[in-house]
């Protein structure tokens, strides 16, 4: 091996662009993984290439079918499904072992018979001497004929010992590592199963991956994986290691910051996929001062070289503000169906569609939409919350009685007509309109906040509105008796 190796040495400008997203199905599709998938998808689209999926399910104890299904579900919801059926890594174990055998045959790898006890002793000695522990196996250059018969062994790569390895990373820039820091890491375990390090390199090569775009926590792995790539004489992919996402306080992202599964943003928080797509896009990448970026614009503008080197900060408030924008832009029937699902009332969809233009004005998520729509389906007599109940005194219930009489004469039941009637009543009583609207809102919705009061009247309809007002008027009468 050359004294100095460069990760870009065999790159070809005419090489077809192929990217991949390769999650491990040991849990949900987390927000950082979703952004990695997005960057891979965009880079492939931007360059007319292919975007592939690989499920790295070699951890058989922790990989589950529900987790695999959740990953596909989350990616499909974001519009980031693969261009081809996903590759299942475990199913390719024989191919991985085949490559290890080729490396053994070419002298680029060796059988190592060091026991776990011997490794533990050497590790302890390095710690005692306060020096880094590096694998220095006497089996690296030993005569194969001297191998102990029947003793378990692992297969290790012969990592370069001298010089340095250079990666011209598309995000991080030029990164150099001394080859003395790279261990002879394991390719095949003693039971013959391939390690993650080997499987990733073989799969990337066989899938034709041209650009490896992933989190910068894998940057150290790239230097090790290059030892396999050079050992096999394969073409080197171009690397782009993206900084991880941090919380708004700059600390490593955790659940308290919003590090949830994509399904939680959809199901629990009521985020729209286009909002999460837009938000993830701008976590570490931007296009001038543009805040709202469509999928089509992102495909035209995205360049991996514009991704920042510093960790992006996740801000839930910004995501919700962005989501509010997309709620206001969204089709009313689509939103009505989402809210009906939240309310577990599919029959409510037609009314919700009519109400949506006024419901979505201030909402920031689907949950808020469902909450603001609750009054439409409340059963009489309404039970006002504490704040609304405070507005329903004997005096205000007296005003409600006059409102009931006035609105009872209203035949058209339009927003304009109802507004004119109540304004006229307020003037006759010498009151501001708000003095009538506040108790009226409490009577109609059981709350102190709602869409505009005239919209509420129209949405409830004449009979239901008058009945709810009458319930509160009668409640005053019952109290007096």
Image: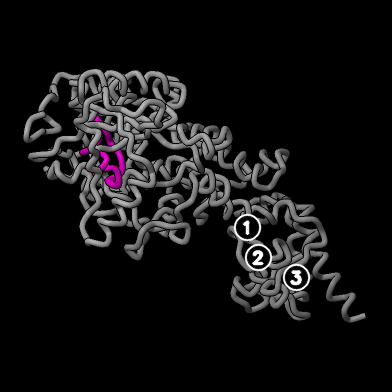
Residue at the disc numbered 1: 454
Which is more toward the observer, 433 or 203? Answer: 203
Q: Secondary structure at mark 2?
A: helix
Residue at the spot 60% in from the left edge and 72% down from the top edge: 434
The magenta stretch is: 211-224
Residue at the disc numbered 3: 400
Q: Are marks 1 and 2 in contact (CB under 8 Å)?
A: yes
Left or right: 364 in relation to 39 = right
Residue at the disc numbered 2: 422
The crowd level at tag 3 (other Cα within 10 Å; few <14, some 14-19, many 20+) is many
Tell me where residue 414 appears, x and y as whole percent. 65, 51
Query: How far apart are labels 1 and 2 at the CA level?
Result: 10 Å
346 shown above or below 229: below
Tell me where residue 213 appears, x and y as whole percent. 28, 36
Which is more toward the observer, 425 or 212? Answer: 212
- Disc 1 or 2, which lies upstream in sequence? 2
Query: How far apart are labels 3 and 2 at the CA level?
Result: 11 Å
Return the mark for residue 225.
none
Q: Secondary structure at mark 1?
A: helix
């Amino acid at each position: 091996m050359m004294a100095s190796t460069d990760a870009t040495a065999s790159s070809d400008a005419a090489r077809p662009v192929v990217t991949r997203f390769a999650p491990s199905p040991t849990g949900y599709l987390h927000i950082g993984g979703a952004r990695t998938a997005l960057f891979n998808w965009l880079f492939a689209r931007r360059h007319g290439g292919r975007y592939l999926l690989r499920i790295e399910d070699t951890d058989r104890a922790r990989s589950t079918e529900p987790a695999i299904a959740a990953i596909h579900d989350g990616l499909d919801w974001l519009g980031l499904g693969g261009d081809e059926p996903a590759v299942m890594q475990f199913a390719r174990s024989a191919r991985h072992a085949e490559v290890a055998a080729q490396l053994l045959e070419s002298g680029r790898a060796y059988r190592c018979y060091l026991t776990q006890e011997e490794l533990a002793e050497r590790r302890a000695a390095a710690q005692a001497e306060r020096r880094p522990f590096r694998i220095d196996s006497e089996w690296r250059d030993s005569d194969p004929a001297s191998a102990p018969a029947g003793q378990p062994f692992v297969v290790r790569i012969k990592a370069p010992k001298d010089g340095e390895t250079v990666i011209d990373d598309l995000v991080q820039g030029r990164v150099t590592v001394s080859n003395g820091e790279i261990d002879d890491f394991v390719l095949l375990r003693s039971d013959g199963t391939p390690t993650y390090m080997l499987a990733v390199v073989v799969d990337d090569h066989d899938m034709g991956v041209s650009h490896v775009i992933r989190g910068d926590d894998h940057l150290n792995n790239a230097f090790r994986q290059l030892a396999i790539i050079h050992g096999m004489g394969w073409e080197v992919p171009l690397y782009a290691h993206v900084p991880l996402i941090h919380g708004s306080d700059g600390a490593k992202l955790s659940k308290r910051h919003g590090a949830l599964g994509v399904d939680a943003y959809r199901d629990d928080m009521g985020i729209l996929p286009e909002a999460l797509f837009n938000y993830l896009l701008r976590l570490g990448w931007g296009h001038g001062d543009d805040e709202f970026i469509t999928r089509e614009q992102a495909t035209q503008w995205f360049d991996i070289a514009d991704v920042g080197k510093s960790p992006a900060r996740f801000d839930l408030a910004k995501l919700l503000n962005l989501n509010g924008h997309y709620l206001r832009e969204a089709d009313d029937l689509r939103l009505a169906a989402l809210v009906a699902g939240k309310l577990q009332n599919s029959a409510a969809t037609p009314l919700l569609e009519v109400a949506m233009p006024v419901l979505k004005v201030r909402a920031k998520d689907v949950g808020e939409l469902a909450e603001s729509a609750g009054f439409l389906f409340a059963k009489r007599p309404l039970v006002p919350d504490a704040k609304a109940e405070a507005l329903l005194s004997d005096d205000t219930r007296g005003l409600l009685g006059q409102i009931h009489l006035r609105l009872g004469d209203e035949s058209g039941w339009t927003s304009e007509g109802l507004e004119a009637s109540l304004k006229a009543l307020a003037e006759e009583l010498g009151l501001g309109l708000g003095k009538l609207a506040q108790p009226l809102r409490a009577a109609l919705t059981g709350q102190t906040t709602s869409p505009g009061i005239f919209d509420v009247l129209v949405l409830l309809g004449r009979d239901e509105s008058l009945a709810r007002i009458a319930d509160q008027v009668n409640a005053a009468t019952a109290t007096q008796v």
